[in-house]
Image (cartoon, rainbow, N blue to C red):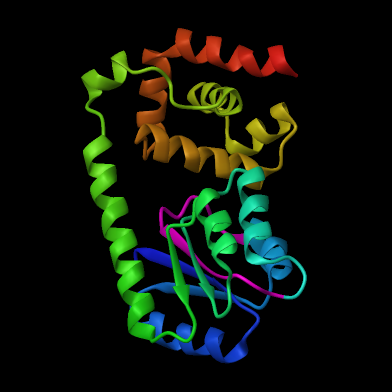
Amino acid sequence: MKNHRVIIVDDDLDIRDGLHVWLSQDYLVEIFDCSESFLSAINDFDFEDGLATCLLLDFQMPGMNGVELQKTLKQINIEFPIIFMSGNAQQSDVIDAWHEGAVDFILKPFTPGKISASLEKLFNTAKQNQEKIKPSESDRTRLALPITPREAQVLLLLGNGHEQQEVAEILGLSLRTVKMYRTFLKNKLNLHTLMELGRYCDKHRASIEKHAMLKQTFD
């Protein structure tokens, strides 16, 4: 079973097809020919599948360019690691991409092996970092909550036994958005099952309720 997903967004058909054939040996690969088509399909991704995901993103494309897509994804709280690909980017373009959180910038033409090496390094580093910061049960009790007020609201409702569809109706959100928040909670708090989530909610209920109130304060 493949444990990593690579999303390719590039208007060059040859690059899309070539990378798809090469990377599909090791990764689950999705391809899109422009930023707009990827954004249109974003709600079809299952954020609950637990797959580490990286975005291979062409810098210059018709319509929304790579950095504009990068900024749009951040605005909707979707922050996949991004590796940019470009044949003629200026230094200022590269700097903008780095400032927005790009993890690598590969110049075209490139070999498939160069892409594979960058992906392998990225996924290995992410795994190592996750192991370093994984808190023990006793540590979690003392840590401040690393979640947003909206995530706290979702956490409380899920911890109280509500189904995700019920949470969506109570908070006025789409089911896909609730699933996205559930994934964020899993990743941030290392809670992989509803039982773990319920225990965490019970242990930190007062802090979570206080944090959730911030959302109402600023609305």
Dividing the image into 4 quarters, which one contains the C terminus?
A: top right
Quarter of the image holding residue 166?
Answer: top right
Residue drawn 59% across the image and 37% down it:
164
- For the residue pair 45 and 85, the one nearer the viewer reads as 85
Percent x, y for residue 123?
Answer: 32, 60
Residue 24 visible somewhere in the drawing: no
Magenta span: 44-61
Can you say whether 68 is above or below 185 in the image?
Answer: below
Can you say whether 49 is above or below 158 in the image?
Answer: below
In the image, farthest residue toward the front: 91
- For the residue pair 39 and 194, the one nearer the viewer reads as 39
The stretch drawn in magenta includes residue 16: no
Can you say whether 4 is above or below 140 in the image?
Answer: below
Residue 163 visible somewhere in the drawing: yes
- For the residue pair 115 and 97, the one nearer the viewer reads as 97
Percent x, y for residue 176?
Answer: 64, 47
Residue drawn 53% across the image and 56% down it:
95
